[in-house]
Structures are given as structure tokens and as C-alpha cells.
Image (cartoon, rainbow, N blue to C red):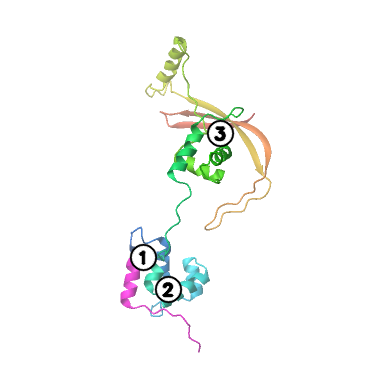
Amino acid sequence: MNRQKYSIKLTDEQCKELKQFMASTSKKNTPQNKTHAKVLLYLDENGEKKLTPKQTATKCKFYRENIYKIRKQYHTQGIDRVLQRKKREAPPIPGKITGEIEARIIATACSTVSEGKKSWTLQMIANKIVLDGVVESIFDVTVMRVLKKTQYKPHLKKMWCIPPQQDADFVSKMEDVLDIYTLSCDKSCPVICFDEKPYQLLDECREPLSMKVGGSVKVGNEYEWMGMCCVFVMCGPLLGWHHADARAR
């Protein structure tokens, strides 16, 4: 009868250590490492409910090749190697984008755009950085990451309402509207808020693929335009009431 090349026989002390490792709340013990500990317990030949590699893969939602790899690591490198990631031997490569380069990217995004252009684009900023000799090359995606990291978004605009200068009538009407929101709840004369929004009606050209375990719904990038509609929303903030209605535009 052929015997397995790599077999797992855990002692009582090792089983106790693995169970404590799985129950630990330390951030160092990642869910993946805890699953590795579970694999060792399932494959333990001294255990009461020993599973085969195929059964273990199904129960832990692993590929069978990973089960074989964990079993080999335990046999050749020990239990500590199975539960912990291997420490990198070489130091990490320093990033290409330094703090000085980030400062130049932000300064360029905040500067006045060249004549004939409305605003800076990511590619324009990347080209300007290269032309100024800051870096030899840089992608527009890298520029986007720098701006996102620093919370600077030159492509966005905020709009607010500023009363015209010396227009007392405008200010008075605005204060009347704001005073309405400070009224107390009165069911006989409630405060009702109303808003409407145009909305595009789109239909899928291909049937979407349903969601599976560990994945998301897959939809095609093509769609069919089915027209427009208007969505009306009414709500009573103090009454806990709301109503929405969609109508053809």
C-alpha cells in the first residue's frame, strides 16, 4: 500500500496552539493564515475527523493545489512557516514619486492653465512635469493618484448661492425660505420639501451574468438609450413621510 509522501501528524500541544491561533483577534493573524491553521487540523492523521485534501479544499474554499502546498510547507519548513508570511530578504524598492515631485504636481494643478484651455487635464499635468525636467516620464494615472491622495480635485467645481451686492430684496426672500425650515412640526400645515431630477433610461444590450460567491455581477459596457424621464420627490422632514414618482418627460 502506497504511503503519502507528505503526511501531517500533530501533537496535542500543536493542536492547542493552532486553535488558539484561530481564536486570536490580533491583526497579525490574518484570515488567510487562520485558514491555513484550519487546513492543518483537517489533514491531521491523529485527528478524530481527518479529511482528505479534496474534502479539505471544499470545506476551506481553497484550490486543491494550495492544500498540497500547505502540506508540503509544513513537512519541509515547519508549522511557523505555514502560519506566517515569509519575510522579504531584499529591502523594498523606493517609490519613484517623492514628496518634491508631488509638490510640483499640485503646484502645476493649482497654476493658471495655458491660453486656449479651460482647465488642466491629467495628461496636460503629466506632460508639463516632464517638460519642466522634474521627471523623465510619468503616466496620467500617477498624477491622478497624487491628486487623489492629497484630496485635490481640479476637475470638480462647487456652486453656492451668493446674494447680489446691495440687493436687500434677494436677501429678504432667502431668509424667508430659511425661516421655514426652522418651524416646529404642525400636521395641519406641514413643511413639505419638493425636488425633481431628469434621469436617463438605459437598457442592457447583453444579458448580465449573475453574481457568484467571491465575485460581482458582470455587465457589458454597451447599452441602449431608452429615453428620458423625470423623478419627482416630496418629503416631510418632521413628519417622517416621503413620496417619489417617475413620469415621462
Comes first in the chain, label 3 or label 1: 1
Badges 3 and 2: C-beta atoms under 8 Å apart? no
- Residue 29 horizontal/vertical position (percent): 37, 62
Q: Label for residue 151?
A: none
Choose the circle earlier in sequence order: 3 or 2: 2
Task: State left or right for residue 193 relative to residue 248.
Answer: left
Residue at mark 2 to residue at mark 1: CA–CA distance: 13 Å
- Inspect the magenta stretch and tell me whether residue 64 lies in it: no
The residue located at (43%, 71%) in the rendering is: 39
Of residues 210 and 214, the one drawn nearer to the viewer in this rendering = 214
Q: Nearer the viewer, mark 3 or mark 1?
A: 3
Is mark 2 in CB contact (under 8 Å) with mark 1? no
**Rendering coords of residue 204 (x, y %):** 66, 45
> In the orientation shown, which residue stands out farthest toward the front?
133
Outermost residue toward the bottom?
1
What is the distance, in whole Å, between disc 3 and disc 1 at their CAs?
Answer: 51 Å
Residue appearing at x 45%, y 46% in the figure:
98
Q: Mark 1 sits on what residue?
A: 22
- Quadrant of the image occupied by residue 249: top right
Q: Secondary structure at mark 2?
A: helix
Q: Nearer the viewer, residue 167 or 233?
A: 167
Q: Amino acid at mark 2?
A: Tyr
Can residue 145 be seen here? The reply is: yes
Give the residue pinned by disc 3: 120
Q: Position of residue 101 (x, y in %)?
A: 47, 42
Residue under numbered circle 2: 42
Q: Which span of residues is magenta-colored?
A: 1-20
